[in-house]
Image: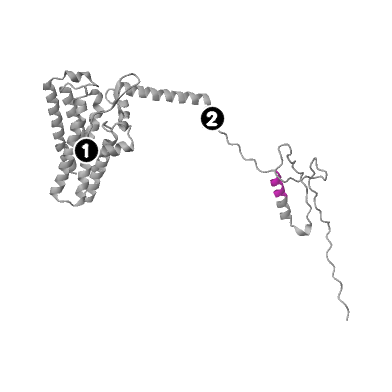
Amino acid sequence: MSSPPPLRHPVPTHPAYIPEPPSTPGSPNGYQRFSSSPGPNQQQQPAPLQQQHVPAYMTSPFQHSQQQQQQQHSLNPPQLPHQPSFVPQPDFAAWGVNDATAQFGMQLGTSAVAAGQEYVQKNFGGIIPLSSVKHHFNVSNSYVIHKLKLVVFPWTHKSWSRRVHRSEQGQTEYQDPRDDINSPDLYIPLMAFVTYVLISAFHSGLQSRFHPKILGESASSALAVVIVDFLFVYIGCYLLNVQASKQAVDIVAYSGYKFVGVILTILSSYLYLSRALYYVIFFYFFFANGLFLLRSLRSLLLPDPALNSSTATISPGLRRRRISFLLIEAACQFAYMLFLVRV
């Protein structure tokens, strides 16, 4: 029996090649090891690209090309774009407008806006004092909460005098609403007005008679009540020789606080209370609003002598007429509120 032929291992056609580590200056053995990061004066030079030879029988042409690309990518990492620290200006040239024309257009627009504001302030500033409107919207969360409590429960409030401060011109002015609970504002009346219109539409929807025109009708009727109340107080102040032209916005604000009691009265009707109890709630908010107006409008009709020296010259007869006017204004709230609660 003959022995099998001896096995022969394939001999590689190319010898294995192990690259030497890159040489570093200052190293006796050609390279240098660091136990930590090199210092600023000992920065390691990038190693030259060494072509590592791999036997042909271990790789394919595709793998060989991928290895070359990975080596080039590791040696040349992609550069991140530099992000500027300033906000870039719009490129007007991309829109077909040169920079000079764009700058001229921006200056012209700014001048037009400033001229428009000056025109509005000059022609309508006496009717709608913009500075006073801004003053009446300067409120805070704490002020809104305490003011609503004051409107609903005026019996618990003691001091109704408004606070004053000296302006930069040395004139005496009332403080902003956020700093004085007794100062009128426009935020609560405006929000109450909008809420009243929405509740009126909601009430109509519960009765299956909602229509979009109800929103306009409710807003129109509520605005008519505010205008009538404002004109009544404004004309009354004119006949009683009260300088109310500078406090017209205050009168509008006081005319809008009645919506708070109207809204709460309407909401109480959803509790399925008896008709007698419903009228008790209505009369409570009527008296609360009447007392609130009596004490608040007093600063307008009977101002503090420390703020207005003309108050000391009011005759007893004129003073009685002004107090009677305050009582009539408080009584008129019954008709206004009775009209508004019938949604």
**For the residues carrying marks 2 and 1, which lies nearer the camera in this image?**
1
- Which of the image's four quarters has the C terminus? top left
Q: Which residue is mark 1?
A: 156
Q: Give left or right: position of 301 versus 174.
A: left
Q: Is residue 293 visible?
A: yes
Identify residue type, mark 1.
Answer: Thr
- Which of the image's four quarters has the N terminus? bottom right
The reply to whether the C-beta atoms of the residues labelled 2 and 1 are less than 8 Å apart is no
Q: Which residues are magenta?
A: 68-75
Identify residue type, mark 2.
Answer: Ala
Residue 294: mark in rendering = none
- Figure quadrant of residue 38: top right
- Magenta-highlighted stretch: main secondary structure? helix
Spot occupied by residue 312 in the image (x, y as percentages of width and height): 18, 19
As for residue 163 lying within the magenta part, the answer is: no
Give the crowd class for mark 1: few <14, some 14-19, many >=20 residues within 10 Å.
few
Residue found at the very far front of the displayed protein: 158
Answer with mark 2 or mark 1, whichever residue precedes in sequence.
2
Q: Nearer the viewer, residue 270 or 1?
A: 270
Q: Which residue is mark 2?
A: 93
**Element at badge 1?**
helix
Residue at horizontal 15 percent and vertical 29 percent from the top: 326
